[in-house]
Structures are given as C-alpha cells and as structure tokens.
Image: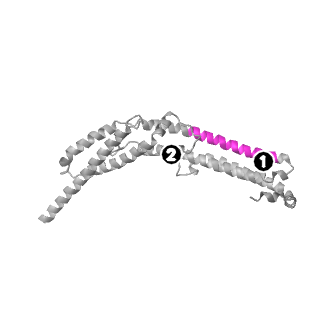
C-alpha cells in the first residue's frame, strides 16, 4: 500500500544503513519458521482436537507457508536496494528449503490419510446397518467409526489434493445418503431400545405381535450392509416403518399406564 514511498531517494538513503539488519531479521524469522515446523510436525495432537488430525496438519502446514511467504514479501519490497546478491540468494534459498519441506510434509500426510481412510471405508462398507452391542442392545454398527469417517469425508471435500482410493471414493459418492440413514437409524434404535427396556412384564404379551413385526424388519436391516450399491430408498422405507411402529408402541404404553393409574386412584 505504501510501497511508493520506497521510491523516494531520501527514504532509500535512510534505509540503506539498516538493510543488513533487515536481512538478518528475515533469516532469523525463516529459521524460526523452520524450527517450528520441525518441532511440531511429529506431534499431531498439537495441531487441533476438533478436525481430523490429517486435515489439521495440512491446515497447519499451509499457515506456516503463509508465514514464510509473508516474511519473504517484506524482504522483496526492499530487495532492489540491497547490493549484496549473495545474501539475497541466501534468503531465497532459505525460503525455498522451508517451502520444499512443508510440501513434502503435506504430501506424506495426504498419502497416509488417503490409505487409512480407504481402509476405514472398506471396513464400514462391509458392516451391517445394525448389530447388537456388548450390552445386548440393538444399535447402529460401528457408529463411532462411521461418524469419524463421515466427518473426515467432509474435510476431504475441501482438500482437492487428497486422492481418494476405491473404497473411500465409493463411500464419498453416497456420503449424503449414508449420513441421512445413519442419523435416522440412530434415532430409531434409541426409541426402539427405550420401548423394549421400559416395557413392564405384564405389557410384553400385549405388544408381542407388534414387536415381532418390528423385529422382522430389523432382522432385514441387520443383513443389509452400508454398501452404496443397495437400495437407499428401501432402507429408508424400512427404517421409517420401524420408527412409526416404535412411536405407536410408546403411545400405547403411555395410554396403558395412564389407564392403570386412573384405576388405582379410583380403587384408592
């Protein structure tokens, strides 16, 4: 913005005695940037706890590159006033070394991220939609890993340089449908488990037929995988059917218990 001021002869005469110190400060800042990159790049937990580690690492490397470019920009604004071409080449070489190191780091992160994400996606695609957990409750299979994979795919969509392997690319193309199914299934199974666990012993025979119908539909979902080649609409329809049945059972339970409480009050 004020670069035109440097074109004034009087300003240039005042700057020349300080150019040597300016070059030293630029080299010190570049050295500090390099030391920061070396000390932190092997500590992925320091990048960020919110985005995926790989995405945070790539963002961190871009910020360091911007810092180095900003430092070089301050120097190039007065570079034409400096007569020692040897030190100028030293500054440019130092900057290029940092850029190359950050580029290599980014390439390694993208490659490792691509391979790990493909492995996780391949595992997810082979899993059934539903399965019993350690407590015997029916729920969405691999919910934590699936949530992590979907979150990583959202970040991958912003990283144009990350090459997706076959499994990851397959899951990426239908991530919106899978996300919707995952959210609906999670809510449905939460309601279903609540109805089953809250049912009183004397209520079980009354809802036995309805539970059998729901369990048949749930059994189909337990044999359906997260593979994108399946009929997403069919899965949605079956999930909505289960959710509708579960909500009806909750309503029936509430009415049944309300009736018993009223009878108890009358008898009392």
Please say which color scheme the image uses: one colour
243 relative to 115 in the view: left or right: left
Q: Counting other residues with Cα less than 10 Å from the Cα at mark 1, is it few (<14), some (14-19), or many (20 or more)? A: some
Q: Are marks 1 and 2 in contact (CB under 8 Å)?
A: no
Residue 91's place in the image compared with 11, above or below, is above
Q: Between disc 1 and disc 2, whose residue precedes?
A: 1
124 relative to 30 in the view: left or right: left
Residue 125's place in the image compared with 82, above or below, is above
Region rendered in magenta: 88-112
166 relative to 177 in the view: left or right: right
Query: Residue 4 appears at what percent x and percent y?
Result: 80, 58
Report the quarter where the N terminus lies: bottom right
Q: Residue at 23% across / 42% down in the picture?
A: 212
Helix, strand or loop under label 1: helix
Query: Residue 191 appears at what percent x and percent y?
Result: 31, 50
Residue 258 in view (yes/no): yes
* Most common SS among magenta residues: helix
Q: Which residue is mark 1?
A: 91
Query: Residue 228 appears at what percent x and percent y?
Result: 42, 36
Q: Quadrant of residue 225?
A: top left
Residue most toward the bottom? Answer: 268
Residue 154 is tagged as: 2
Q: Residue at 18% across / 61% down in the picture?
A: 261
Residue 215 is tagged as: none
């Amino acid at each position: 913005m004020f670069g035109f001021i440097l074109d004034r002869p009087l300003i240039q005469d005042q700057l020349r005695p300080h150019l040597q110190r300016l070059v030293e400060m630029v080299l010190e800042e570049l050295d500090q940037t390099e030391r920061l990159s070396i000390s932190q790049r092997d500590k992925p937990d320091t990048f960020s706890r919110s985005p995926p580690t790989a995405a945070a690492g790539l963002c961190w490397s871009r910020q360091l590159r911007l810092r180095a470019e900003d430092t070089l920009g301050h120097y190039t604004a007065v570079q034409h006033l400096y007569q020692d071409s040897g030190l100028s080449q030293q500054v440019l070489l130092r900057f290029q070394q940092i850029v190359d190191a950050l580029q290599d780091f980014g390439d390694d992160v993208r490659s490792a991220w691509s391979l790990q994400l493909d492995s996780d996606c391949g595992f997810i695609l082979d899993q059934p939609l539903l399965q019993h957990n350690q407590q015997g409750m029916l729920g969405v299979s691999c919910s934590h890993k699936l949530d992590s994979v979907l979150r990583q795919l959202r970040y991958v969509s912003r990283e144009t340089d990350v090459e997706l392997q076959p499994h990851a690319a397959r899951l990426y193309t239908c991530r919106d449908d899978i996300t919707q199914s995952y959210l609906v299934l999670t809510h449905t199974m939460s309601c279903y488990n609540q109805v089953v666990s809250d049912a009183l012993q004397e209520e079980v025979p009354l809802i036995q037929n309805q539970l059998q119908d729901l369990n048949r539909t749930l059994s189909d979902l337990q044999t359906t995988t997260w593979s994108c080649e399946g009929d997403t609409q069919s899965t949605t329809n079956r999930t909505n059917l289960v959710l509708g049945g579960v909500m009806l059972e909750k309503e029936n339970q509430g009415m049944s218990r309300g009736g018993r409480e009223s009878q108890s009050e009358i008898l009392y």
